[in-house]
Image (cartoon, rainbow, N blue to C red):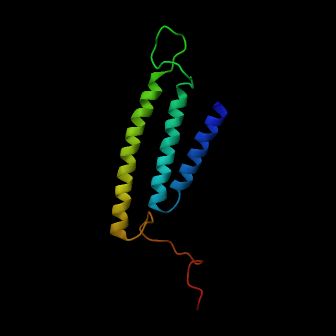
Amino acid sequence: MELVYAVCVGFMSTCGIFLMLRGHTFTLVIGLTLLSYAVNLFLFASGGLTIGAPAVLSSSENYADPLPQALVLTAIVIGFAMTAFAVILAMRGRADLGSDHVDGIEPFDPLAEDKSQ
């Protein structure tokens, strides 16, 4: 179970970083969101993966640590606000610059030029 969880967190982190390194703002926002999801899963797993255990101390010996759950809940709210801000910023940049590229200028692509000449 832990191996599958670790592979999922690693895969989401890898995809998030790959998308963040792309040149367009939409893929940057998607990459940031994926990376924040991976961090949330990592924080949640740091409390230990216990099934059916209460979140607070009770008379039982088996309990889940409530701190990572509170951190993940806070990170979800902050991640939503960050995503909304990044989307608005990307929309404003697209409207002002007329391009979706992070620098505002599309790089020259020699393979995309018209070859009908």
Q: Residue shown at 38%/59% (left/top)?
A: 90
Q: Residue shown at 64%/31% (left/top)?
A: 2
- x and y, in percent, of residue 45 in the image: 55, 30
- x and y, in percent, of residue 25 in the image: 44, 60
Identify the residue at the far front of this view: 52
Q: Residue shown at 38%/47% (left/top)?
A: 82
Above/below status of 14 relative to 76: below
Q: Is residue 10 left or right of residue 23?
A: right
Above/below status of 11 relative to 3: below
Identify the residue at the far top of this view: 59
Q: Residue shown at 51%/54% (left/top)?
A: 20
Front-most of residues 111 and 34: 34
Name the quadrant of the C terminus.
Answer: bottom right
Q: Is residue 108 left or right of residue 102?
A: right
Quadrant of the image occupied by residue 79: top left
- x and y, in percent, of residue 6 in the image: 62, 36
- x and y, in percent, of residue 93 in the image: 36, 63
Q: Is residue 58 left or right of residue 9?
A: left
Name the quadrant of the N terminus.
Answer: top right
* Circle count: 0
